[in-house]
Image (cartoon, helix red, strand yellow):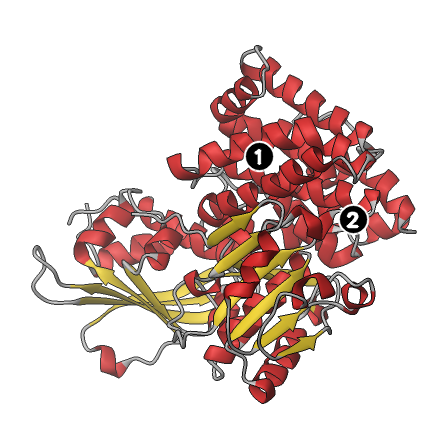
């Protein structure tokens, strides 16, 4: 079972995105890469970062980022480790998570608001990856 | 963690008198028909301070109208913005308040997680129709003209400080308008009750709104002098608006927003006529909730039979309001033919399947199912998939 935010986990996540036909349709015109950030809390001492390039319904590449200052992405989605665990377990609705500020999203909101279904399906893809925390 | 929020609600006959307790400068946001019809006078007669009227609101208001209103606000410098009208005017008033307080914010950028400043500008919403529930919700629906699509923005700061639900404001509503606005309210109440975000704080409001609408909407439409019915329907619309503020709208609105964006028929017709179809289809995901709602409406059947009875009840309400139960028939009234419908079907499907309301569905229908839903609602076929 891949460790959360390891390269193996990101590869599985990319695979899950690329095999999701509904996501492909919903994000068919989407262009924008993401930096996903896991912020430390009680169970995690150092932050973790992952880069995923999303383009026209597919994930073109994904990799672990050691130094976030070295990547410039269109969007950044961040949250605490404990909240990420709940998100992947389906205990937090991703949009409610954003509204209640458990997660933060930076980037062009006008664009995000046109792709809300794609955003929801993207989070669904994370749930398909068996994860060791 | 989740929220239920509400403006302070002043309701019942004479509730407009509350305005006399306010001081300051008032910007009234409305449309020119309401000014001409003297409806806005019913509000201004209670204002003590100076006021200005921005009456540029159009049906299916655009982002540009909000910007125009903000320009007026920047010149007049109000302490309080008062939206007077149907959902369009109230939504524009909400948009003007948040952008007036945050001039650097692009209205299209408003999302639930956008950081905004609150500068103490009061917002009062006074509905002149009983349907949108906009006075009780923290959402704005604006039209992106170049994309033929409606975009819903949600933010806590969008919520009004006060809503004034005075039946005086709706007593001259034409029968047809009363019908489609009432159907919008019913769509809110039913959608919210079966939403993935349904919750204990909103559910009771949905049930009461449904009860009031099934019982009083036909009476209120037929006779605007039926004070009891008119007031009950007016209250029901706000109850349903409060419910969608927390539980959100659902599938009838995914279809309704899409139909309205492409064909510009009244939103309440688009949603209300979709309801029998979306109810039957969506019951595969929410059978228990529909059964429960049906029970509260006095339907004793269980499972699928309860859903069928509920659908019958909706169709019967449509009939009692002289509203057809197919898109084909309602489109005819607006000069939209079969060819135009089928030529735009792909756009309808795409817009519905990517509408923000799909986020709070228990499961999102595939594009194929959305296509079938539109065709079945157009042709009046019983849902069998």
Q: Residue B308 at x, y = what percent? A: 65, 19
Which residue is at the front of the view, B71 or B13? Answer: B13
Discs 1 and 2 share one subunit: yes
Q: Residue at x 74, y 37 (%)?
A: B273
* Label ID, residue B209: 1
Tell me: B168 left or right of B108: right
Depth check, front residue: A24 or A119: A119
Look at the image and tell me whether residue B338 can be seen.
no
Q: Which residue is mark 2?
A: B173
Instruction: Give the mark toward the camera: 1 or 2.
Output: 2
* Camera-side residue of B111 and A119: B111
Q: Residues within 10 Å of mark 1 (few under 14, many from 20)?
A: many
Residue displayed at 59% across by 15% down: B299
Q: Could you tell me how many numbered marks the image carries?
A: 2
Q: Residue B331 — which label? A: none
Asked which quadrant contains residue A104, the reply is bottom left
Q: Secondary structure at mark 2?
A: loop
The relative height of residue B87 versus residue B323 in the rendered view (above or below) is below
Label 1 close to label 2 by CB (< 8 Å): no
Chain label for disc 2: B
Instruction: Estimate the x, y position of residue B26 in percent, counting from the top left.
Output: 58, 75
Residue B320 visible? The answer is yes
Query: Spatial distance from mark 1 to mark 2, Cα to Cα?
Result: 20 Å
Quick one: label 1 or label 2, which is nearer the N terminus? 2
Residue B27 placed where, x, y %?
60, 75
Height in image: A46 above or below B70?
A: above
Residue name at image x 41 percent, y 51 percent? B5
Assign a secondary structure to mark 1: helix
Task: Give the chain letter at badge 1.
Answer: B
């Amino acid at each position: 079972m891949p460790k959360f935010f390891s390269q193996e986990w990101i590869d599985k996540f990319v695979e899950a995105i690329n095999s999701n036909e509904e996501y492909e349709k919903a994000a068919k015109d989407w262009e924008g890469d993401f930096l996903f950030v896991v912020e430390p809390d009680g169970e995690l001492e150092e932050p973790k970062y992952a880069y995923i390039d999303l383009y026209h319904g597919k994930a073109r590449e994904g990799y672990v980022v050691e130094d976030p200052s070295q990547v410039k992405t269109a969007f950044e989605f961040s949250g605490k480790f404990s909240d990420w665990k709940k998100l992947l377990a389906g205990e937090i609705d991703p949009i409610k998570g954003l509204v209640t500020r458990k997660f933060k999203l930076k980037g062009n909101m006008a664009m995000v608001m046109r792709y809300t279904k794609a955003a929801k399906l993207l989070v669904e893809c994370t749930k398909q990856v068996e994860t060791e925390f | 963690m989740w929220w239920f929020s509400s403006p302070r609600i002043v309701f019942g006959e004479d509730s407009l008198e509350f305005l006399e307790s306010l001081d300051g400068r008032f910007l009234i946001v409305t449309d020119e028909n309401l000014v001409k019809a003297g409806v806005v006078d019913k509000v201004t007669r209670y204002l003590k301070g100076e006021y200005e009227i921005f009456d540029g609101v159009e049906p299916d208001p655009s982002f540009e109208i909000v910007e125009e209103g903000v320009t007026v606000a920047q010149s007049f410098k109000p302490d309080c913005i008062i939206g007077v009208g149907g959902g369009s005017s109230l939504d524009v008033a909400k948009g003007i308040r948040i952008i007036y307080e945050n001039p650097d914010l692009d209205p299209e950028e408003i999302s639930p997680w956008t950081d905004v400043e609150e500068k103490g500008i009061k917002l009062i919403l006074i509905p002149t129709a009983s349907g949108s529930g906009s006075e009780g919700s923290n959402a704005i629906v604006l039209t992106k003209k170049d994309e033929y699509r409606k975009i819903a923005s949600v933010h806590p700061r969008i919520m009004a400080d006060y809503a004034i639900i005075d039946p005086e404001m709706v007593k001259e509503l034409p029968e047809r308008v009363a019908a489609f606005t009432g159907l919008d309210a019913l769509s809110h109440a039913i959608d919210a009750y079966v939403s993935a975000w349904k919750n204990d704080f909103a559910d009771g409001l949905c049930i009461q709104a449904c009860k009031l609408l099934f019982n009083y909407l036909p009476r209120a439409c037929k006779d605007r002098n039926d004070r009891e019915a008119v007031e009950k329907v007016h209250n029901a619309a706000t109850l349903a608006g409060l419910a969608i503020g927390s539980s959100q709208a659902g599938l009838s609105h995914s279809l309704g927003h899409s139909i309205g964006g492409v064909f510009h028929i009244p939103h309440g017709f688009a949603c209300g006529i979709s309801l029998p179809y979306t109810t039957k289809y969506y019951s595969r995901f929410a059978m228990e909730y529909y059964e429960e709602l049906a029970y509260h409406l006095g339907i004793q059947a269980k499972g699928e039979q309860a859903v069928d009875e509920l659908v019958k009840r909706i169709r019967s309400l449509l009939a009692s309001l002289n509203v057809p139960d197919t898109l084909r028939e309602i489109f005819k009234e607006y000069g939209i033919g079969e060819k135009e419908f089928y030529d735009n079907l792909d756009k309808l499907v795409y817009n519905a399947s990517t509408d923000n309301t799909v986020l709070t569905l228990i499961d999102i229908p595939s594009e194929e199912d959305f296509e079938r839903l539109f065709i079945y609602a157009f042709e009046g076929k019983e849902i069998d998939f």
